[in-house]
Every structure is written in C-alpha cells, then in structure tokens.
Image (tube, rainbow, N blue to C red):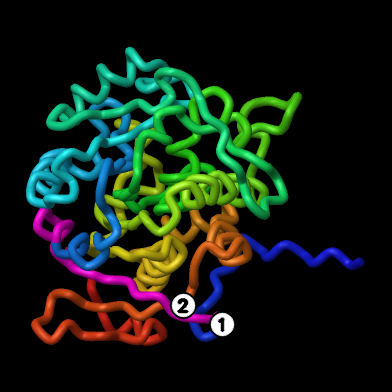
Amino acid sequence: MQRLAVPDGRRYVPYEERTGNESIVYFTRDLSAAGLSKVYRKINGLISGKVAVKLHTGEKNGPNIIPSAWVKAFMAAEPSLKDAAIVETNTYYDGDRYTTALHRETLEVNGWDFCPVDIMDEEGTVDLPVRGGKWFDHMTHGSHMTRYEALLALTHFKGHTMGGFGGSNKNIGIGCADGRIGKKMIHTYPGQGMWSIAEESLMETITESTKATLDFFGKRVAYINVMRNMSVSCDCEGLAAAPVVTPNVGILGSLDILSVDAACVDLLYAMTEEEHHDLVERIETRHGHRQLSYMKEMGMGNDRYVLIDLDHEEMRILPADAVKDLKPFVR
C-alpha cells in the first residue's frame, strides 16, 4: 500500500481549497472581561458541574498573558464558572513553573490568586487513551484532570517557538500533559535530546495529546481564543518574549477546536504583509499549519466555518471565505 505524503505544514491552505462541513465561530472586537462573557454565553450550553478553565498563566511578570483581572471579572460574572478552577501543569523546561513550589510562587506574582488553581500533575499522573493516533496509544496527563466534568480552553492566541502558533490545540495538547512524562513524549524521541521532535511530527504529537483530553471530556468542552498582544513568542518566554508587532484583533469562540484555531490563522493572513509578516514567518518556518491539517485528519473538527459578528445588533453572519471584508483589527 502506498503511504500518503504528510501535508506540508509550511503551506497555508486558502479557505476556497477546503472541503467539508462548516462549524460556527463567534467573534467580538471587545477585548475585555465583558468581551469574554459575550463570546462565552454563545458556547457555554454544555459547560456545567466541576469545570476546569485551562489557560496559560505565564512565566513571572509575562507582559502578554490574558490579564488576570479580566479572567477574574469574567469568571465572577458567569454562573457556570462560579466554582470553576484554573488548571495548569508543570513545565518540561527548567523555569518559573518547573516545580509545583515555583509554579505556585509564579501564579501569585501574576495575579492568579482569585480562585483555586489546580496544578494537575502535583500528585502524579494519569494515562488517557489516544484513539486513532499514529504516535501514541495514550497520553500522560496530570492526575487531577479526571476530577473535572467540563473544560473551557481560554487561550491567548500567539506565536510559539516550536509550534509556530499557540491556539486552543497547543493550550490543551501541551498544557494538560504532565511536566515530566507527557511533555517529554510530545517533544522528545526516546533516547534523543530534549526538543528532538519538531516540525510536522511535533504538530502531530501535540494534536494527539489534545485528542486524548477532548475524548475524555466529550462534548463538554468550549474554546475561546484571545487575539491580543500576539508576539511570535509563547507566554512561556515571559519577559524575554519578542516585541509585539501584530495588531490586536478580538476574541473568538466556538465548540469546534479546529474551526476556532483556523479562524484565528485566517484573520492573521487577512492582514497586510507589514502587519502579519513576523507571525506568518513564525508559523510557516515551524510548519505550524500541520496542526490544522492533522486535527482535520483526526476528526477533531472542521476547517470551514461561519463567522458570526457579535458586535452588531443584527449579529451579522459572514461567510468565512469573505473574512477579509470583516476588517476586525483593533489598533
């Protein structure tokens, strides 16, 4: 049997070349706690019970993370998040969040002290199955993940040193894997040095880790991507992050992880060359588009979508192939 070639993760696939069903993505230009609520209230129907809010809490004093004050006000305003916990795991690299003690110190510095923060691998790990994967049959997560009934991925969309971009897929795939076993599985070939897995292979291992999480929660997952302070660097670089040169955009939300990440990438590509050059270069040189194509291959969502603009009373429905007409950029 002839093995099909892996899609080139350097290539952006224009909307008109995509096939399949469409999902719904909601959009607002309102970069605030109120904007988070505006989007969340469209996608929160199955978010109930014990809820985990997965976000990147950042290295100490990181300048680009979602402001903790926004998240505090947002969670306080939403009944389904009243008793929710922010969830994180320790890092694979030696930094401000490498151990639980260091991690808790960093959380306090960055203002994540207004609700419970569960470092899910603080007390060990749990293996969750990866269904249909080619790299893994399971992924190792923080053991506390199984305490939760629903998941909200609250993601700062930005660049990423190895992944090209960090959207909901990266937030869940790397962020829920435990710091010693799971993250090593994602990043390192057995017997080789740290970070030896890269490009298309890394996009696939990240995605398979995400799928293990999504299969565990089933339909009780929602996704919000915040397109603000989008450096080419991940928030794990903290104060060393590259300067922000890309315009702020707004907040997107969906019940489809592929659609929400694809919509963010489409909005980037709709910018001018000057506005998007750095982020596009980061995505393409790291082969980041393979995140999207592999999510589609794994049956994790649709890369076609309808973008619903929430900032107008008539709630404009925009076909995704006309996304350039939206011109949503906030200076």
| Type of amino acid at the residue the image marks with label 2 | Arg
Q: Which mark is residue 19?
A: 1
The quadrant in which residue 121 appears is top left
Residue 78 vs 175, above or below: the answer is below
Asked if the magenta segment contains residue 36, the reply would be: yes
Note whether 159 is above or below 309 in the view shown: above
Q: Is residue 220 left or right of residue 94?
A: left
Q: Which residue is mark 2?
A: 304
Q: Position of residue 176 (x, y in %)?
A: 44, 37
Q: Are marks 1 and 2 in contact (CB under 8 Å)?
A: yes
Q: Residue furthest right?
A: 1
Residue 36 rendering spot, x and y as whole percentages: 17, 57
Identify the residue shown where x is 33% and y is 39%. 56
Q: Residue at x 55, y 57 (%)?
A: 291
Q: Mark 1: which amino acid?
A: Thr
Hey, which residue is sitting farthest top in the picture? 101
Q: What residue is drawn where x is 56% and y is 46%?
A: 206
Q: Which residues are magenta?
A: 18-37
- Of residue 215 and residue 90, the one placed in the foreground of this image is 215
Helix, strand or loop for disc 1: loop
Give left or right: position of 319 versus 138.
left
